[in-house]
Image (tube, coloured by chain):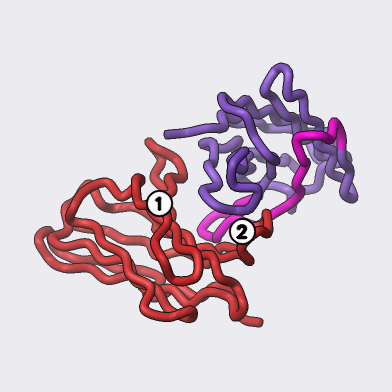
Chain colours: A red, B purple
Amino acid sequence: DAGVIQSPRHEVTEMGQEVTLRCKPISGHNSLFWYRQTMMRGLELLIYFNNNVPIDDSGMPEDRFSAKMPNASFSTLKIQPSEPRDSAVYFCASSTQGSTEAFFGQGTRLTVV
Amino acid sequence: SQQGEEDPQALSIQEGENATMNCSYKTSINNLQWYRQNSGRGLVHLILIRSNEREKHSGRLRVTLDTSKKSSSLLITASRAADTASYFCATGALSGGGADGLTFGKGTHLIIQP
């Protein structure tokens, strides 16, 4: 298995633009997590899905952030409009529900200028 | 909010020495996990210890858990230059039992000097 696949690996965008981050979880995994990592705040859980259903989005910082999981093999995290303080590395992770190990993608490094 | 807090924030030792990192957490947990992150990469799961376990080994890794003190330690024995990375503890919620809502600390950055 190729593992969790995220795209793009790097994204540079101007303030105010819409940004869409993509994630393909490991086949057969039915839990998916979006995390954000910064030097100041460390690794923060933004939202997670079980069986394509959002379970907890309390970590989503603002209404500018939204996440979808239209099917078991694809999820998106959208920021609209983007701001410089959104600059961070965004990680997607997946697991088998009930499992205790999360498998992480390589991350998307987002820079908003 | 951060559940686990690692200590120290940074650690530099000579190759061959043992490295010890600590983690403290605040609420009741079902399990505690340690992950490793190489620069520019995603996190990789190292080891898990359940709340009813006190010690666990995996290769050169040794993890302890003290639920009365809400703390855990990760020991890497006979360190190698390739062990240079950031190490994170993560706690699994008591109600969940799975990977649901894993919360991470800010990590310990370990540097192994050759």
Q: Which residue is mark 1?
A: A56
Give the side of residue A12 with respect to residue A34, left or right: left
Q: Amino acid at mark 1?
A: Asp
Q: Quarter of the image containing the N terminus of chain A? A: bottom right
- Chain hosting mark 1: A
Percent of width and height locating residue A94? 55, 65
Q: Residue at x 69, y 44 (%)?
A: B33
Looking at the rendered image, the disc whose residue lies closer to the viewer, 2 or 1, is: 1
Q: Residue at x 16, y 68 (%)?
A: A18
Magenta segment includes B64 = no
Q: Is A23 in front, or is A31?
A: A31
Q: Is residue A113 visible?
A: no
How far apart, in angstroms, are the residues tagged by discs 2 and 1?
16 Å
In the depicted structure, whether residue A12 falls above or below residue B11:
below
Q: Which residue is mark 2?
A: A102
Q: Residue at x 13, y 66 (%)?
A: A17
Pick whichever of labels 2 and 1 is earlier in the sequence.
1
Q: Residue furthest left?
A: A16
Give the side of residue B112 with respect to residue A27, left or right: right
Q: Amino acid at mark 2?
A: Ala
Percent of width and height locating residue B52? 81, 34
Check disc 2 and report its element: helix, strand or loop: loop
Image quadrant in which you'd find residue A39: top left
What is the magenta range?
B36-55
Q: Is B43 in front, or is B66?
A: B66
